Structures are given as C-alpha cells and as structure tokens.
C-alpha cells in the first residue's frame, strides 16, 4: 500500500504519503507540524475515511481521503509510525527528517450519550432497590401492627 494525497487542490505542506511493509507496519510521511510531538496517539475514523494523529495535547493532524485498502490495514494497527519532514520550498533540496515516532492507538471513550445512558440505568437500578427496600419496610410494619 502506497497512498499519496493529491496535491493539486492542496497546499504542498498538506501532502502526505502512507507506506506499509511486509510485516504489516504502516508509516505516515508528512511535513512537520509546529513544535515537538509529545505522547502522540492516533485514531482511525472509518466513516469519514481519515486518521486523527494527536501530536500533542493541543495539536491534531488529520490524514483525510483514505482508500478502502488503507483503512483495512490501519484498523488492525496498535501503532502507527510517523515521519515528519522539514518543509522546503526548493524541490531539489534534500528532505530533512525532523521527527520520527510511533503513535499508539487511542482508545475510544464512550461518547457523552452512552455515559448519560449508563448513569440513567444506574440511577433507575438504585431507585428500584430503594423502592423495594421501602416496600419491604412497609410490609414489616403492617405485619407487626396486626
């Protein structure tokens, strides 16, 4: 799999290349972002055919326009390798690698709706238990008064 984002409608700085090897490892080759990456992670969004690479807490890179073949390979990964090169306006200049790192798969957190539904279910369960306890107390009181 070698995938190259078409640069005709994009700035040259927004071009990327995906490469894989026989071991099934995948690397994204792109131009470097601002600052050094810290605790990088990635997340595959199959629906929108993109990869979100979190270079750091506040720096997100989107790799868009993925083909089906690339998605199939990426969704099997726990680690995505990233190589960031220095952008150079001179096409004859040698590419300088600024950062090379492994981004780990970001575990999906349940969305807010799922969290709220879990809380509602928990509160209904608690109410049900509380209601059962109240009814049991009332029954005991009724029995003891007879």
Image (spheres, rainbow, N blue to C red):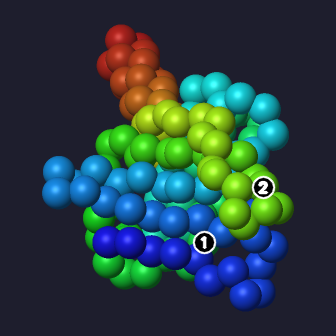
Instruction: Give neighbour class at mark 1: few <14, some 14-19, many 20+ (Cα, 10 Å).
Output: some
Q: How many marks?
A: 2
Farthest bottom residue in view: 8
Q: Is residue 1 visible?
A: yes
Find residue 88 and name its label: 2
Q: Residue 64, labelled with which disc? A: 1
User: From the viewer's perspective, is residue 70 above or below residue 34?
Assistant: below
Return the residue nearer the eye: 68 or 22: 22
The residue positioned 25% from the left and 56% from the top of the image is: 21
Sequence-earlier tag: 1 or 2? 1
Question: Relative to 110, is 68 above or below?
Answer: below
Q: Nearer the viewer, mark 1 or mark 2?
A: 2
| Camera sees residue 110 | no
Helix, strand, or loop for circle 1? strand
Residue 1 position, x and y percent, is 32, 72
Answer above or below: position of 93 versus 72. above
């Amino acid at each position: 799999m070698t995938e190259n984002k078409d640069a005709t409608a994009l700035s040259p700085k927004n071009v990327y290349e995906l490469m894989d090897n026989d071991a099934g490892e995948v690397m994204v080759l792109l131009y470097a972002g601002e600052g050094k990456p810290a605790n990088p992670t990635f997340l595959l969004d199959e629906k929108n055919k993109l990869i979100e690479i979190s270079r750091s807490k506040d720096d997100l890179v989107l790799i868009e326009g993925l083909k089906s073949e690339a998605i199939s390979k990426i969704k099997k990964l726990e680690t995505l390798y990233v190589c960031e090169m220095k952008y150079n306006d001179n096409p004859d200049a040698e590419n300088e690698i600024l950062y090379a790192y492994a981004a780990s798969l970001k575990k999906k957190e349940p969305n807010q709706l799922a969290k709220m539904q879990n809380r509602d279910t928990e509160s209904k369960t608690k109410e049900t238990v509380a209601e059962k306890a109240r009814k049991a107390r009332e029954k005991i009181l009724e029995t003891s008064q007879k």
